[in-house]
């Protein structure tokens, strides 16, 4: 049975090891058993699964994951947490602890070694200072994975899930939705953590598509167009793209292509769907 995940046992562990929270590592530890159950349920872990946990902290969620998965690989950057993890996870023979920065780990290689190259599931209460780079590198690197179930800042979860015409809609929405189906599964208030974060949090599950929902000839070009149009949100798409360095498109050419798509020259990128960005990219 998982023993951590409540305020008393978390505080006891922190005191036993004289642990000092490191703000720079985004350390907010979960202390609510019902939230932990929700995350692990949402991740739909079964006994055949290999799970990658990013930032196990003192091993709270790791215990819950280890109860259900075949194996949990937990990657933690803070060296001070490693002896704690070795203690709190000593009863679990199916946990591998790695002391590393997740952004420097070759996850493709890890999946090969630990799961014979078959898709893994990622579960994490993410450090909020690097949420976007972690998600984008997992999705873009095409590491074999089934799903990513993560706690993130509430606004970031909303940005990943919304569609065109809302103020949260942007490059992150489109990038995530090209690779995965996002579903927010829970909202989590600050009092579920020690120390309390200054922001609300949410758990979101990204289920990887086997095939992207739209076809595009050159993904990189499409994402360059997406980034350029949201960098200059207030401008029309034609002006925004013509101003962007490195794209090599003129205002006239964009206007011409928009016309071909049956759209006005004054349209803005924030109204564009993924399908429309794909079409724009192919036509340009
Ligand atoms: N999973 C624990 C929990 O739910 O209580 C801790 C979550 S805490 C929000 C984020 C964890 O990620 C911390 O343990 C922190 O040290 C770790 N972390 C921060 N940056 C990291 C990185 N680049 N690579 C791996 N772990 C990191």
Image (spheres, rainbow, N blue to C red):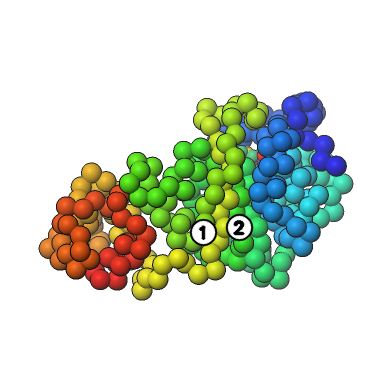
In which image quadrant can residue 3 be found? top right
Q: Dot 2: what SS? A: strand
In which image quadrant can residue 110 be found? bottom right
Q: Disc 2 versus disc 1: distance between alpha carbons?
A: 8 Å
Answer with mark 2 or mark 1, whichever residue precedes in sequence.
2
Q: Kindly identify which residue carries mark 2.
A: 147
Mark 2–mark 1 CB contact (< 8 Å): yes
x, y percent for residue 61: 72, 43
The residue at 24%/69% (across/down) is 284
Instruction: Tell me, yes or no, if residue 239 can be seen here.
Output: no
**How many residues crowd mark 1 within 10 Å: few (<14), some (14–19), many (20+)?**
many
The label shown at residue 180 is 1
Q: Quadrant of ligand 1?
A: top right
Is 159 on the left or on the right of 24, as rendered? left
Is 197 on the left or on the right of 3, as rendered? left
Q: Is residue 133 above or below residue 218?
A: above
The N terminus appears in which quarter of the rendering?
Answer: top right
x, y percent for residue 192: 65, 30
The residue at 59%/40% (across/down) is 186
The residue at 47%/55% (across/down) is 176
Instruction: Tell me, yes or no, if residue 175 can be seen here.
Output: yes
């Amino acid at each position: 049975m998982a023993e951590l995940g409540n305020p008393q046992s978390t505080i006891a562990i922190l005191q036993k090891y004289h642990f000092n929270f490191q703000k720079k590592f985004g350390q907010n530890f979960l202390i609510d058993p019902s939230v932990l159950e929700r995350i692990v349920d949402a991740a739909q872990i079964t006994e055949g699964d290999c799970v990658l946990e990013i930032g196990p902290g003192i091993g709270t969620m790791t215990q819950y994951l280890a109860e259900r998965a075949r194996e949990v690989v937990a990657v933690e950057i803070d060296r001070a947490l490693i002896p704690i993890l070795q203690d709190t996870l000593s009863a679990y023979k199916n946990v591998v602890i790695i002391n590393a920065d997740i952004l420097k780990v070759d996850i493709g290689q890890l999946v090969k070694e630990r799961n014979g190259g078959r898709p893994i599931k990622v579960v994490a209460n993410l450090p909020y200072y690097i949420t976007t780079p972690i998600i984008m590198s997992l999705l873009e690197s095409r590491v074999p994975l089934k799903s990513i179930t993560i706690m993130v800042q509430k606004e970031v979860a909303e940005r990943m899930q919304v569609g065109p015409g809302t103020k949260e809609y942007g490059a992150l929405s489109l990038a995530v939705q090209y690779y995965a189906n996002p579903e927010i599964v829970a909202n989590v208030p600050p009092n579920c953590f020690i120390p309390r974060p200054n922001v609300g949090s949410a758990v979101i599950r990204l289920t990887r598509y086997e095939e992207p929902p739209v076809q595009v000839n050159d993904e990189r070009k499409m994402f360059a167009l997406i980034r350029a149009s949201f960098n200059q949100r207030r401008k029309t798409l034609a002006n925004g793209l013509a101003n962007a360095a490195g794209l090599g498109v003129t205002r006239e050419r964009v206007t011409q292509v928009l016309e071909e798509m049956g759209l006005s020259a004054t349209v803005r990128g924030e109204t564009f769907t993924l399908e429309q960005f794909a079409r724009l990219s192919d036509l340009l």
